[in-house]
Amino acid sequence: MSLLVFYLFAAIAVLAALGMVVLRNPVHSALSLALVFVSLAAMYVLLSAPFIAVAQVMIYAGAILILFVFVIMLLSPGTDQGVGALKAQRGLAILFGAALLVLLIAVLGGAVLPPTRGTFTPEAIAAEGDTQAVGALLFTNFLLPFEITSILLLVAIVGVIVLAKKRQSISKQ
Amino acid sequence: MPILVPDINLRIIAPALIVTVTAIVVLLGELVTPAERKRWLGYLSIAGLVVAAFAAFSLWGANASGFSGMVVADNFGLFLTLTIALSAALSILLSIPFIHAHEIDQGEYYVLLLASVAGMIVMATATDLIVIFLGLELLSLPLYILAAFQREDTRSLEAGIKYFLLGAFSSAFFLYGIALVFGATGTTNLAKIAASLAQSAGSPMLSIGVGLLMVGFAFKVALVPFHWWTPDVYDGAPTTVTAFMSVAVKAAAFGAFFRTFQFALPALALDWRAVAAVLAVLTMTLGNVAALLQSNVKRMLAYSSIAHAGYILIALVAMSANGLSSALFYLLAYTVTNLGAFGAVIALSDGARERLEIKDFAGAAREHPLVALALTICLLSLAGFPPFAGFVGKFLIFGAAVETGWAWLAVIGVLNSLVSVYFYLRPVVQMYMSEPAEGWSGIRVAPLVALALLIAVISVIALGVFPAPAIALAAGGLIR
Amino acid sequence: MINYLWLVPALPLAGAAINAIFSRKMPRWLVSVLGVGSVGLSFLVALAEFFTVLGAGAQGVFNVSIYSWIPVGNFKIDVAFLLDPLSALMLLGVTGVGFLIHVYSTGYMAEDESYGRFFTYLNLFVFSMLILVLGSNYLLMYVGWALVGLCSYLLISFWFTRPAAAAAGKKAFITTRIGDFGFGLGVILIFVTFGSLNFADVFARAPQMFQLGAPIITTITLLLFAGAVGKSAQLPLYVWLPDAMEGPTPVSALIHAATMVTAGVYMVARSHVLFSLAPFSSEVVAVIGAVTALFAATIALTQMDLKRVLAYSTISQLGYMFLGVGVAAYGAGIFHLMTHAFFKALLFLAAGSVMHAMNGVIDMRQLGGLRSKMRWTYITFFAAALAISGFPLFSGFFSKDEILAQAFESGHIILWAIGLLTAGLTAFYIFRAFFLTFHTQARWTEDEGRKTESRHSPSSVVGHPSFHPHESPASMTVPLAILAVLAVVAGFVGMPSVMGPNFLEGFFAPVFGEAAAAIPAGTEWMLIGASVAVGLIGIGVAYWFYIASPEIPVNLAAQFKGIYTLLWNKYYVDEFYSAVFVEPGRRLAMFLWQVIDVQVIDGFANGLGRAMASFSGALRGWQTGYARAYALLMLVGTVIVIGWLMLR
């Protein structure tokens, strides 16, 4: 049963991701992206991680995507007409993309995961509580990555400001 | 439930922490610093880097691991930390007059550069694939922005966007590789991966994961055929940023590359060594041959940096203690040499008007004999000409390859470094053997640039003539 | 004294460093004092070291470690100097001849605006050459090897405003690099084979590890010899040396005659343990040496540019040295290296003195009759010409004779014959140059108005130019005189056994072992007789063609007007000589020079460049600038990497 659900959402995720890249209208692309986020959230649920699923929906599908749509509407960039050059590019890209896919399927299709299972089995998570497990991990084992991520976000903000704000040297002129 | 307090040992991450704190202080300082005092933010950044370097030095030999085995302060990582801090400090010395001349002297420049340094240090000392990835992102993101820092210049913007797009593309491969390696071994910790592989044979899934990791690293250190972004980005980015990127990113990314492949994946060495050997040959050869035809110094140095990544990769293929220490020495030698070369190029520029075409250097020796001499020494060192740092570095790497039975790779390396002499000497020929072009009069070399140049050139000579202490330090930099 | 050995290279280095940084702010006399003084002091130290070695006799081998250079794991490379009879003699030659040429340069380059730069390069060169000679391991030798190449390149294109000079520098660099690659490979192979690069280790292990004729030793020695072929301008990599004459004449004398070009010979002699184990390689060395000697000598017959004659002559004489070391007569090869350094440096400096006097003209068709104008130059050139011709008791006589005798004695009769023929040609072309320059009628006119000016870059005068030739200043003539004395007497240190004691052979015993059994006196006298006869014939023929024939017309003018005009005109003499004497040879020489030299070898070098350029251009086609094209190429790379890893 859960396998069926997995394949359903997996298919939706892949198709929506393709749609996001292929569709020409930016709003359509953004909506496809929302679909990707939602299907990913469904998978997190399947993996007994409801907290992450909710966070995924709220933060990505909710906050970030809404921001995207806002920006698109404010800028109203119109429909991307595509760039003409490099005709050979498309064929080659499809060819090698397919090759990569074939390689991955060939390998991962028959892959056997190691028998040892991690600490966080569904039972363990159920006993501890999903939210608690994530929280505890973030502040113990994953403290350092967590902090690095926060610096990363700070840098992103600084970067956006640097690129977007008016320069003093320009305003002086 | 009880929360186990993790082994928070701030001392281990002190260098990265100090750099980060400096970045935040500079960020706040930017708000209160008047426009004409912006250079003080640069001095502050250098001070932070010096303190971080001292912290790294005080940790020498500590060999302590912390944060649930995510990061380690071993001599290997500390050597790289010192190299990175040196490269950042020299880059900032070059940057202070440069960004002033180009009217981009904002404090954020230093903030981003320091953040990138923090990412590099994290990457060089990380012992977990997730932390390596985060370090990679933390070093890359500021560089995307720094590449585009000259917003008025479309080529700079283009460089930033190109670097960002392709960087994200390669990050995806890298991340997928981590996922597959995790799937195959059940862990992202390098030591545990090694332990797991010591017991069980590899699987096809692991092979793909390793391949994707290699692609991710290959992109960052610019190995052929994942190097395409390099000439365009190096060319478009502000020259000081190019100088910084060309050396520091290599030090950090190669550090993680060696740590991952030589110490987590030795079980698969039979497979990846062959791939790496071929990549090394391609990288050296294409880098050098493409550099032959460049008429622009920045592009020439971009291809040269590709070629040097190829030489360093030989040390990884050797997969020995000597290989590792030779790579460390080479990275240090390359750092001072390349920064010296870029420093001289910056010194020869006329305010905001840069001289980047090789023919622009005509007659520089007559107007600026010392800068010309410095550039000549650095270019000769890049070419592996004795008795400069680059020669000793190449000797060590080729020696390590020969020792471990990869003599053919060393031979290709020697052939390549012979070819490289031709393009490295072209600016020299222009400087010494051409009538001066117009517009030389009245150019004054900024004191800070001169200082950076002096430090770089003295290091190049010292590392070439008296390399023993640095070699000893690098040999002490073995992992574990 | 051994403790001060480091001063020998350190002094010129200090001179170079100070001049490099401060020469623009210093007066010329100070630049000269630093440049000349540093090499002079270096010579004095070298002299003391030489006597230390001499005094130590059979124990005269010193290994002086300066400091540990590259200490890694098992292989430790020290900056260490090896002082033995071989390197001591080389030291003396490099610093001594170097000092004289430095002194000469103060006069020759006096008017040049890049005076400081010149002395910087020259001092740097001396330093590099000393490192090459003193290094006690192959890596240090390689360092010196590369640095002398760099200095040579810088000095050839010293007058870079002349396109020919810049092109010549480039050609020298490209050509010698091909040889350097071989040398580098040889060094790597030595390291792989012996696990060490120290001369002492390698030479101790080689005879224990390998039999005579072991393939690996043959490969190593052939690779090393490839380096020597490039550096010492042997077939087929000799092409750069004649062009290198575009550099200032003192440079031609120091680098392209006396020192750097002999580095190949030194290296082979230094590696004699390896070459002795590789009979095939030694044979190759001997054959290439002999063939080059003859080949270059025939080309020298047809050249009109005085410096080019000397350049081809240098190639030819280097061939002799290789013939010597190729037949295992290492001492003889080095002996000739030494005497050649004296007389060839002298020939070049005298030619430079002529250029100095003649406003840079060096074409012998515009010279002549300078004997009375330049007494010192004339006499010294004459002494050197006799020395190189192998005139009895002059230095070249002893050294050339020893090489030929050893070649003969070791059974290389054909190589001996080639060497003998070359000796005759040598005597002829050098005296042809001598007569055309100093005797015969002046082919220029006196110009009282141009007394002071002197330049060395060839002026563009055509036809019948006018000059005011004058003797060069003392700074130039004194070195000429000293070198002339050396060129005359230096041979007595290595006399053949029938004439006296061979001091040099005993001196070299700690390096090359005890001398071979003496050649029977009868054979020895026969060989000496043959050499002397051939040399005298060469001189005589030159005399006949360029001096004697102008007198014939005076007596016979009335009766044989046709013959008179034919013989009076030196052009006819040249053509007569060509048609009767060596027309086939000349054709061959011209063919070799024009087709092989200019087309095949130059063409190869240029073609290599073109191939590189087109390859590079093709690469540039991929560098489209489109991020998505790059992404695609990265994808391709990824698929290949992953596919490969999976399929293994």
Image: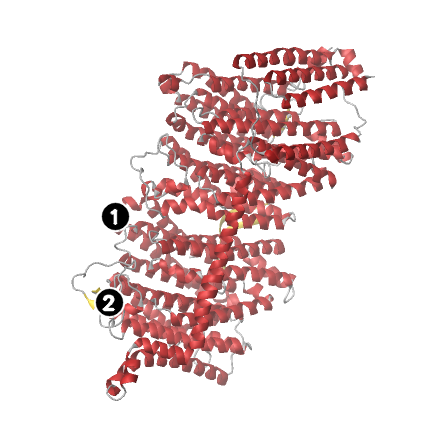
Indicate the secondary structure of the residue bearing disc 2: loop
Work out whether C26 lies above or below C538: above
Where does the C terminus of chain B fall, quadrant-wise?
A: top right
> Closer to the camera, C3 or B205?
B205
Q: Position of residue B422 (x, y in %)?
A: 47, 48
Q: Chain of mark 2?
A: C
**Marks 1, 2: nearer the viewer:** 2
- Closer to us: C433 or C639: C639
Disc 1/disc 2 C-alpha distance (Å): 39 Å
Residue occupying the point 49% across, 76% down: C418
Subunit under mark 1: C
Q: Label 2 belongs to which residue?
A: C464
In the picture as drawn, the residue positioned furthest to the left comes out as C448
Residue B289 vs residue C20, the one in the foreground: B289
- Of the numbered discs 1 and 2, the one sitting upstream in the chain is 1
- The tag on residue C562 is none
Residue C27's disc is 1
Residue C5 x, y percent position in the rendering: 43, 55
* Residue type highlighted by circle 2: His
Q: Are marks 1 and 2 in contact (CB under 8 Å)?
A: no
